[in-house]
Image (cartoon, rainbow, N blue to C red):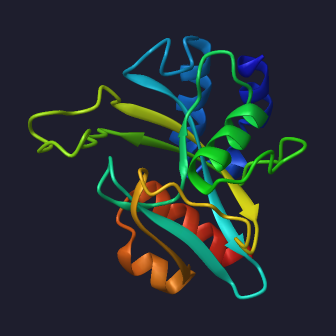
Amino acid sequence: MLYEQISKIIDVSICDSESTYTNFQKRLKEDALTRDENSQTHFCVYFLPYNAKNKKVFITHHKKSGLWISPGGHIDKGEGLLDILNREIYEELGVKQFFSKTPSPFLLTINDGLKYDIHNAPIENKVQACKTHFEIWYIVNTDGVNFNIDPKEFHDTKWLTIDEAEKIVTDPANKKALEILKKKY
């Protein structure tokens, strides 16, 4: 199921580069698409909560990564894209069943060389096994009134203009998502 869903959305027009397109195709053929099946390289979903009325995005100061990033997470074995989107939106924003059908992604990125601090240990002592994320990005149109943020996930969260978010976001994939959002919306 996941293989078919991902193969249908891989389109060069939403990839951050032509090599991302090629590498998404190549990685998809390798199978073992989830972290449960391959802890080193797997597919993830990220979503950018966006309020079109005030042109603000919701970003998080993520505890494990130590970075200001968009919410999202790893796809678990047996999940489809709609499952992962709704699960992560619930886990991180406290909103159940946000989507009734799978939206179209707006961006595909690859994040290599990941190093996440786990359990607040010094990063040189405990590094998560993830090395490469194949990231599928979605826009979540919302005003956030139903958010019930889990404080175990984040140091802080903020609604910011895209310009403000670009000043504190350092992760290249997140910067690209903000850049595209700024152009499209």
Question: Picture coordinates of residue 151 (x, y %)?
Answer: 44, 57
Residue appearing at x 78%, y 86% in the figure: 53
Residue at the far bottom: name it. 54
Q: Is residue 167 left or right of residue 66?
A: right
Residue appearing at x 76%, y 47% in the figure: 96
Q: Is residue 2 left or right of residue 46?
A: right
Residue appearing at x 25%, y 40% in the figure: 119
Residue at the far right: name it. 100
Q: Relative to 35, is 142 above or below?
A: below
- Image-quadrant location for residue 31: top right
Q: Is residue 108 left or right of residue 169?
A: right
Query: In terms of depth relative to the viewer, which is nearer, 28 or 78?
Result: 78
Residue appearing at x 73%, y 73% in the figure: 145
Q: Is residue 178 left or right of residue 140?
A: left
Q: Relative to 2, is 61 above or below?
A: below
Query: In terms of depth relative to the viewer, which is nearer, 158 or 16?
Result: 158
Classify the position of the N terminus by image quarter.
top right
Question: Picture coordinates of residue 72 (x, y %)?
Answer: 55, 47
Question: Picture coordinates of residue 105 (x, y %)?
Answer: 73, 49
Classify the position of the C terminus by image quarter.
bottom right
Q: Relative to 165, is 16 above or below?
A: above
- Image-quadrant location for residue 169: bottom left
- Image-quadrant location for residue 67: bottom left
Query: In terms of depth relative to the viewer, which is nearer, 111 or 101?
Result: 101
